[in-house]
Image: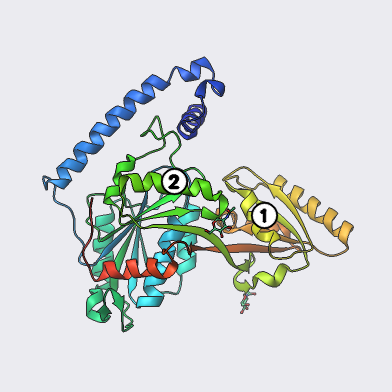
């Protein structure tokens, strides 16, 4: 089963320009017609479902507060969770309203744990559950709700006064693109610059959960990891989006390091300069270890060593032994205790096992999504888009 999944994944993410026959055996190639047929069926069901909602045969569920959806068209890749956090932070800090994040809580418990840790002690609420309408109802009932217009005064969509309320003022729908049964006031679609749409086909033959024409329903597209691909690739992705929706604002985003915390004590936060001129060992089990190591190198350490494990790898005692041996080598070589740096994902997967690295210092690198400024689209204009949706100014649809 795992094997089949890997092959289907390979087929889906092989760009159109690359012949599949060069990477797959004839037996594996023989499943392609079946996948294509399933993709066609999927397309029919999808469009039927959209038609039913569009003409009101099935009523949409409307929450009493504005809804901002953050979604994607493909499976795999990333950027959705950091964007949900970015939106929540903006609403809480800039507008002063309390958001309710509605997440299905799927895609790994480490992710849900991370969101909860980031927002502990704030007025952001996190509702986890597959039935998001039911989850929302129970949170709105428990905490009460308030319409943003009632607490903040908006002028051309920009809040002029900042009031603070602990009642829920807005809902953020995590992975909301396909969740069409709930009405939304703003649709943000994330695109992963590193693997935008694979072979351009729908599931299961391709990675697309919806055709690219779904950009018609979007209010903004955000190309994530934009700093990790050449400018030409960004231009290609942008023009493919604009082909579908000529007026869609397109933003670029990336992950920027913000600080470290100590693995043994999450409330002990450290400045990025903490590793300046130190010997560092980067340990990670994530999809793109290069970008992690590059970020550490930019902080001016004396020497950087690295140990990369496969994505989602669960650290075992034997791994800890090996990491320790590497650390002792570094200590002998440079005469001082090296520092270990891991990513938040690695920390949340199993924070206890890292304790085995004592007496070496283990730091966890925290990153935040940032919007990059380019041709008229900046963090400020993105935030304006968010706040405008709260006062429900008109929406353009193609
Ligand atoms: C897209 O949505 C699926 C859930 O259906 C999720 O597993 C995946 O991580 C998402 N991709 C991105 C780019 O966040
Ligand atoms: C890509 O574009 C950005 C901004 O337009 C520019 O700062 C950067 O130097 C460009 N990078 C390359 C590799 O051309
Ligand atoms: C954790 O760190 C915080 C902030 O530096 C400190 O106040 C607290 O005493 C530490 N807790 C423990 C158990 O060491």
* Residue sitting at x 74%, y 69%: 276
Could you tell me if residue 227 is visible in this image?
yes
Instruction: Name the mark on residue 293.
Output: 1
The residue lying at 64 percent from left, 48 percent from top is: 315
Contact between labelled residues 2 and 1, with CB atoms less than 8 Å apart: no
Instruction: Give how far across and how far down residue 104 sits, in percent.
Output: 36, 52
Disc 2: CA contacts within 10 A as few (<14), some (14-19) or many (>=20): some
Compared with 208, 369 (above or below) is: below
Q: Which percent across, then down, holds residue 153?
A: 26, 81
The residue tagged 2 is 237
> Which label's residue is closer to the chain start, 1 or 2?
2
Which residue occupies 70% across, 47% down?
Answer: 319
Residue 258, image x, y percentages: 58, 68
Q: Position of residue 186 (x, y in %)?
A: 29, 60
Q: Is residue 181 above or below residue 204?
A: below
Task: Report, in whole angstroms, how far the alpha carbon at label 1 lies from the one at label 2.
Answer: 26 Å
Q: Secondary structure at mark 1?
A: helix
In the image, is 116 to the left or to the right of 359?
A: left
Tell me: is circle 1 under 8 Å from ligand 2. no
Q: Secondary structure at mark 2?
A: helix
Residue 368: which disc?
none
């Amino acid at each position: 089963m795992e094997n089949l999944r890997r092959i289907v994944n390979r087929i889906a993410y092989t760009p159109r320009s690359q012949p599949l026959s060069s990477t797959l055996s004839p037996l594996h190639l023989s499943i392609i017609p079946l996948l294509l047929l399933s993709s066609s069926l999927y397309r029919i069901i999808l469009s039927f479902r959209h038609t039913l909602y569009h003409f009101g045969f099935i009523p949409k569920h409307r929450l009493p507060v504005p809804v901002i959806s953050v979604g994607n068209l493909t499976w795999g890749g990333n950027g959705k969770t950091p964007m949900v956090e970015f939106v929540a932070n903006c609403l809480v800090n800039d507008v002063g309203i309390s958001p309710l994040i509605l997440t299905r809580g799927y895609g790994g418990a480490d992710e849900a744990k991370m969101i909860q840790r980031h927002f502990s002690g704030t007025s952001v609420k996190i509702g986890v559950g597959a039935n998001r309408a039911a989850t929302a109802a129970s949170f709105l009932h428990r905490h009460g709700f308030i319409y943003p217009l009632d607490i903040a005064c908006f002028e051309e969509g920009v809040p002029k006064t900042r009031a603070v309320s602990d009642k829920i003022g807005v809902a953020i729908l995590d992975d909301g693109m396909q969740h069409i049964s709930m009405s939304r006031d703003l649709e943000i679609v994330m695109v992963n610059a590193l693997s935008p749409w694979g072979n351009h086909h729908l599931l299961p033959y391709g990675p697309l959960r919806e055709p690219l024409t779904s950009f018609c329903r979007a209010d903004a597209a955000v190309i994530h990891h934009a700093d990790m691909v050449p400018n030409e690739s960004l231009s290609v992705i942008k023009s493919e989006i604009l082909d579908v929706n000529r007026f869609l604002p397109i933003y670029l985003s990336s992950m920027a390091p913000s600080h470290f915390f100590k693995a043994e004590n999450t409330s002990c936060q450290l400045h990025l300069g903490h590793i300046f001129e130190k010997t560092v060992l980067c340990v990670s089990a994530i999809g793109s270890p290069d970008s992690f190591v590059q970020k550490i190198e930019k902080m001016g350490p004396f020497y950087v060593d690295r140990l990369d494990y496969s994505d989602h790898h669960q650290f075992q005692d034997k791994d800890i032994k090996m990491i320790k041996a590497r650390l002792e080598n570094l200590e002998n070589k440079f005469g001082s205790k090296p520092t270990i740096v891991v990513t938040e994902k690695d920390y949340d997967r199993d924070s206890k096992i890292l304790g085995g690295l004592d007496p070496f210092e283990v730091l966890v690198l925290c990153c935040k999504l940032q919007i990059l400024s380019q041709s008229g689209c900046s963090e400020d204009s993105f935030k304006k888009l968010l706040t405008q949706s709260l006062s429900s100014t008109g929406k353009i649809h193609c």
